[in-house]
Image (cartoon, grey):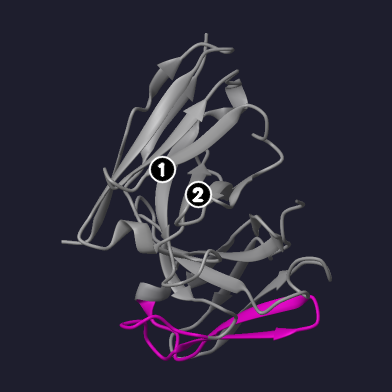
Amino acid sequence: QSALTQPASVSGSPGQSITISCTGTSSDVGSYNLVSWYQQHPGEVPKLIIYEGKKRPSGVSNRFSGSKSGNTASLTISGLQAEDEADYFCCSYADSTSLVFGGGTKLTVL
Amino acid sequence: EVQLVESGGGLVQPGGSLRLSCAASGFTFDDNAMHWVRQAPGKGLEWVSGISWNSVTIGYADSVRGRFSTSRDNTKKSLYLQMNSLRVEDTALYYCAKGGSGSYWHFELWGRGTLVTVSS
């Protein structure tokens, strides 16, 4: 159960698009389409924004999208807004009973 | 209102024990897997344990396996985490999280957490 690898930080200007990567192995990210993404603002509870690789829960903006290629999952945020500034965490199936998180990425909106 | 409320956190000495509880309301508890996720101060999220709706599947992170035990009581709509042999590195905010509809593999709803501090 090694943590998934995310960039420590990314940044972008309002209106731009950014992508956050989440790299694992063929045993976790690469094995099934069971990656989820969470947004956490400072002092707040994490919020689910993408599940099963690319599905959005009801109420989540369509500016958020997920994808996967091989052992790397990605979260893309388009039309960046100030309110998107937060920490983002990926999470994946790890084995038949376990999950594993990435280390988290701090998004700064310039 | 759909919510999860954790309790049972506190200050404990290394080697001690604590039992966390999570009370669910506003949804059909026994339809969902449940999980514990923790976050050390200023750090990222760490999955701790998960349990299927019928308690048949229970998983643990390597860091807690053999020391922590997860259980649930569907009649009381409650989730529990028994933590033994606590270490300083177990200090964290412990969140209770509801699995997705029909899925063990993501966290659809989170509680506000209960703080566990392990220190002498």
Q: Is residue A49 above or below residue A42?
A: below
Range drawn in magenta? A55-82
Q: Amino acid at mark 1?
A: Arg
Query: In percent of the image, x 77 and y 66: which residue is there?
Result: A24
- Element assignment for label 1: strand
Q: Is residue B23 left or right of residue B67?
A: left
- Residue A47 in percent (x, y) is at 40, 65
Q: Quadrant of residue B113?
A: top left
Instruction: State the residue position of label 2.
Output: B55
Instruction: State the residue position of label 1.
Output: B72
* Proximity of marks 1 and 2: CB atoms separated by less than 8 Å: yes
Q: Is residue A56 above or below residue A85?
A: below
Q: Is residue B41 left or right of residue B74?
A: right
- Residue B103 in percent (x, y) is at 50, 69
Query: In percent of the image, x 45 and y 57: which residue is there?
Result: B53
Q: Earlier in the sequence, mark 1 or mark 2?
A: 2
- Residue A63 in percent (x, y) is at 44, 89
Residue furthest to the top: B120
Q: Is residue B22 magenta?
A: no
Distance CA(mark 1)–CA(mark 2): 7 Å
Mark 1: give few (<14), some (14-19) or many (20+) Cα within 10 Å: many
Residue furthest to the left: B1
Q: Chain of mark 1?
A: B
Mark 2: give few (<14), some (14-19) or many (20+) Cα within 10 Å: some
- Element assignment for label 2: loop
Mark yes or no: residue A110 visible: no
